Amino acid sequence: MSTMQALIFHEPGKISVEERPIPRISQGEVLIQVGATSVCASDIRVYKGEKKARAGVIPGHEIAGQVAALGDGVDEVALGDRVVVCPIIACGECYFCLVGKRNRCLRRLTLGYDEDGGFAHYLRVPQGIVKLGHIIKIPQNMDYEIACMTEPFACVLNSLESCRVQPGNSLLIIGAGPMGLIHLVLARAMGAAKVIISDPVEERRRTAEELGAAVCVNPQKQSLLKEVLSATGGMGADAGILSVGAVAPVEEGLSAVRKQGYFNLFAGFPPGSQLTMDANRIHYDELFLTGTQNATTDQYARVSQMLSVLPVARKLITHRLGPAEANKAYEARLGLEGLKSVVLYQ
Ligand SMILES: [Zn+2]
Ligand SMILES: [Zn+2]
């Protein structure tokens, strides 16, 4: 067998499953036999033309699998290792790489956008990932469909840590899509006591309730600010997360955060989105308005250990598809149907 099935991104609105040669690897590279790859909201943004990716690329950056071949000189991993991949190809030399923030590398490339990603039976892992330790071994008992969610969980850990979420805290999450719900699950595991989540879709609010949200708000029918204040004794939430790609809810979200609280813009926005807010709120109430994108290597490693003791994570997977129907995994997300869609390659 020298070919494999791969999902190809041609241009916005156009993806297809095609036969492609199994990639060859060179010195310093690793070949991974993919176990599972999940669809991310940012894959959908590429499909919609809101985010750039190379035409002809194999998408997919939430990847778990097994090491199938090693290029010359590779001693970071061994044949047969079960792993997840941090998809960031970093230079290892710039300021951000040197301070351990490779997600902000000045010469960063990313699997699934610039180089071929995980929606295929095999993945060539470039040297820039291998030598920086971005192939991370997973706990023995963890299966691939859970392991491939290491990437979104790492992004969420970065988001929650940037908001300094502490045991006992209250947290507002705007958006109960897959990433909003991962925020909920991880925040609860980190000790957040009261999570208030807002989403217009009833099914999502129901899932949020099952996953431990204290208050679920329908923003089309209820006042988010009022609900947050009543849930927090009039003070406002310790932190807020925006997990929808729209700026409209930001001002109300900020108003629902307490003095000296944090508010993180987690989701990406359509290009050119502009934000308006009361600047004095930030000044007089000493608010921290932050943004996060992806995560550090350290956060990947820590969250992969956490995931192995978070059985609730499996509840987030609602669609499992075979390699030939990888494009259908996108359709489910485009229709806002269910939560995580995973393509199983083993
Ligand atoms: Zn992702
Ligand atoms: Zn760098």
Image (tube, rainbow, N blue to C red):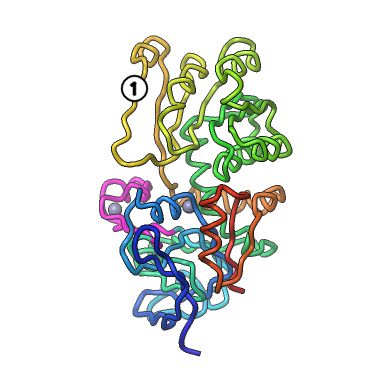
Task: Please indicate whether residue 182 sits to the left or right of residue 279 in the image.
Answer: right
Q: Nearer the viewer, residue 335 or 119?
A: 335
**Residue 92 image-quadrant placement:** bottom left
Place of residue 345 in the rendered image (x, y in percent of width and height, measured from the top left): 58, 72
Q: Is residue 334 magenta?
A: no
Compared to residue 285, the image places residue 315 above or below, namely: below
Magenta segment = 87-112
For the residue marked with disc 1, what is the amino acid? Thr
Report whether 337 appears left or right of 263: right
Q: Which corner quadrant of the image does residue 290 belong to?
A: top left
Count neighbours of disc 1 (C-alpha within 10 A) and say few if under 14, some if 14 to 19, many if 20 or more. few
Nearer to us in this view, 202 or 139: 202
Callout 1: helix, strand or loop? Answer: loop
Image coordinates for residue 119, horizontal then vertical, percent: 49, 68
Left or right? Give the position of 311 relative to 236: right
Residue 200 higher or lower than 318, as above or below? above
- Position of the C terminus by quadrant: bottom right
Q: Residue 74 at what x, y percent from top left?
A: 41, 75
Residue marked by disc 1: 276
Q: Residue at the far bottom: name it.
A: 1
Along the line of sight, the residue nearer the viewer: 311 or 93: 311
Relative side of 176 to 74, left or right: right
**Residue at position x 31%, y 30% from top?**
274
